[in-house]
Amino acid sequence: CPHGNLYIEDNRIVPASRLLSSAARAESLTPEEYIHRLRNFQLEGGGPELTVLSNVLRRPISIFELDEKQPDKNNEGDTVPQLLPDRYRIKRVGVFGDCFTDPCLTIPDSAVLSGLQPGAYSWHLNILIVDAGPGEKHACALF
């Protein structure tokens, strides 16, 4: 079992072994089976893995998705076919590790912050999740 503690939402601390047990139980697996399936790409990572990554990196991770609006409906209630737009808005759907703060904020006259708004250099790790087809999602980092 993993050792140590992890920060989770609302600055709560949870033992890493408890987070692993909870994630495994949600999949009806033992912790050992859960880790084995993650390592062999038989199981997709999610919230527990993003919690661990945020703690390892000691920085917040924000998850975004495309903000797809509902299609327009005609008078009969049928959906009007729409072309894919050139642009989509994105919306933040989750944050992991929001308890971590930018260490550069405490450095007076930091070269990193010189002339920039705090956080403008993307202290957060931002990830966009996109549906790529039935049962398939892709993720990419936003810079």
Image (cartoon, rainbow, N blue to C red):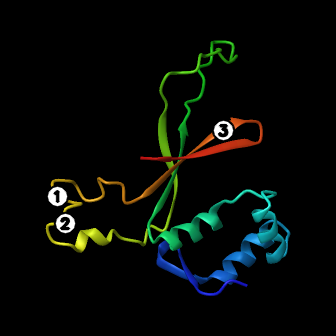
Q: Which residue is mark 1?
A: 114
Between the C-alphas of marks 3 and 2, the distance is: 40 Å
Residue 60 shown left or right of residue 119 in the figure: right
Asked if the residues shown at circle 1 and circle 2 are in contact, with their CB atoms under 8 angstroms apart, the answer is yes
* Image position of 88 (left or right of 72): left
Q: Amino acid at mark 2?
A: Ser
Is 139 or 68 nearer to us in this picture? 139
Tell me if residue 81 comes above or below residue 45 in the rendering. Answer: above
Left or right, 17 with reference to 84: right
Q: Around disc 2, counting alpha carbons within 10 Å, would you say few (fewer than 14), some (14 to 19), or many (20 or more)?
A: few
Please tell me whether mark 1 sits on a helix, a strand or a loop.
Answer: loop
Mark earlier in primary sequence (3, 2): 2
Relative vertical location of residue 48 with respect to residue 15 in this rendering, above or below = above
Question: Element type at marker 2?
Answer: loop
Q: Secondary structure at mark 3?
A: strand
Whole-angstrom CA distance, mark 3 to mark 1, is 38 Å
* Mark 3 or mark 1, whichever is nearer to me: 1
The residue to which callout 2 is attached is: 110
Q: Residues within 10 Å of mark 3 (few under 14, many from 20)?
A: few
The quadrant in which residue 75 appears is top right
Q: Which mark is residue 131?
A: 3
